Image (cartoon, rainbow, N blue to C red):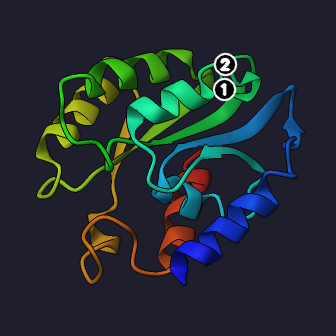
Amino acid sequence: MKKIFLSIILFIMSFNAYANPVNDKFKCIIVGDSIAVGLSLADYDCKTLARLGITTKNWFETFQYNPFYRETLYKIGIISLSTNDLYNGNTEEYLYDIRKGLRADKIYWILPSKTLKPTQYEIIRKLSEEFYDTAVSIENFTRDGDGIHPNTLKDYLKIITFLMEKE
């Protein structure tokens, strides 16, 4: 049921191709996996390039030429990737390329579970430092569920509101 609901939301969001520009820049972009889809449900006029269950490699292959990704300036960028990756050595390269292509004044990385995905956690922590970005742990919002996704829509809304208000 949860997957059907999120699939319907993604379908509806695909019709919203344009965000509202703010001072010649778009407000925000959210890129990534199912966590990114959940974050996009808040009404912040964010462009979202996300898919349920997508790996970092698949995200890059799907969206690398999307003009909303490489050719658009944003005030805020949010990256949530690597949770669906089986570590095979390429995750860091793809994440690096994705970050290099994202054009935003401020970038937030959503850290995957340190317990369930320790390698991916360290990669994102390292990349966020390398690019002078901010890594954000969502562990407090995932404890009662699967340890990966925030427990409720309200938790997703708390996370995105926190990130938007830090601007």
- Quarter the C terminus occupies: top right
Q: Residue at x 79, y 34 (%)?
A: 26
| Residue 42 seen anywhere in this rendered image of the structure | no
Q: CA distance from mark 2 to mark 1?
A: 7 Å
Residue 65 x %, y % = 66, 18
25 versus 7 height, above or below = above
The amino acid type of the residue labelled 1 equals: Tyr
The amino acid type of the residue labelled 2 equals: Tyr
Name the side, left or right, on which 87 lies relative to 1. left
Q: Residue at x 79, y 51 (%)?
A: 14
Image quadrant in which you'd find residue 145: bottom left
| Residue 146 seen anywhere in this rendered image of the structure | yes
Residue 110 x %, y % = 39, 48
69 versus 135 height, above or below = above
Residue 32 versus residue 163: which sits nearer the camera? Answer: 32
126 versus 142 height, above or below = above
Q: Are marks 2 and 1 in contact (CB under 8 Å)?
A: yes
Q: To which residue does mark 2 refer?
A: 65
- Quarter the N terminus occupies: bottom right
- Label 2, residues with CA under 10 Å away: few <14, some 14-19, many ≥20: few
